[in-house]
Image (cartoon, rainbow, N blue to C red):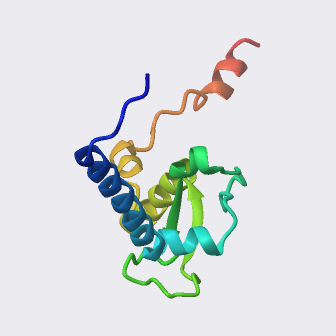
Amino acid sequence: MTLKKTPLQKDKLDKIVSDARRNQELREQSYRGQALKLYPWICGRCAREFTHSNLSELTVHHKNHNHDDNPADGSNWELLCLYCHDNEHSRYEETRYGNATSKASASPTATHNPFADLKSLLGAKK
């Protein structure tokens, strides 16, 4: 038994397909779409390779950290995996604003010297 598609179902299906094609065209016009066409699908830091199945884990990183700087030649972009991209932005923030955790956890220098009187203690045993 085969099911016949009603005109309403066919219209719905046609709309889904046309929306998908339009969205793909929009993605390809975006800087991510352009970068994915320009560069091989490999992380620029860890060299992890990507396929269609895991391509969502590959991001476009702006080398100068300016997301409005998108030259058509891709000279401000590099493809990074999610992990390397997060690491790059963390390092950038630490450099830009300073590492707040190391400043907050810096303790005063110790003043006690446990070996200060060692010579006299060793000399007293003779």
101 or 11: nearer the viewer = 11
Q: In the rendered image of this protein, does residue 11 appear above or below residue 31?
A: above
Residue 63, position as x, y percentages in the image: 53, 74
**Residue farthest left in this picture:** 8
Q: Quadrant of the C terminus?
A: top right
Q: Residue at x 36, y 65 (%)?
A: 97
Check the picture and name the quadrant holding the N terminus: top left
**Could you tell me residue 107's position as x and y percent?**
38, 42
Q: Residue at x 57, y 51 (%)?
A: 55
Q: Tally the marks.
A: 0
- Residue depicted at x 59% and y 83%: 75
Q: Residue at x 31, y 49 (%)?
A: 10
**Which image quadrant is residue 123 in?**
top right
Q: For this view, does 97 lie left or right of residue 78?
A: left
The image quarter containing residue 99 is bottom left
Residue 35 placement (x, y as % from top left): 56, 72
Tell whether 11 sits left or right of 124: left
Spot the residue most to the top.
125
> Residue 60: horizontal and vertical position, in percent?
51, 65
Residue 120: tell me if it is visible. yes
Q: Quadrant of residue 6?
A: top left
Q: Is residue 62 visible?
A: no
In this view, 119 is above or below 124: below
Given residues 9 and 104, the one toward you in this image is 9
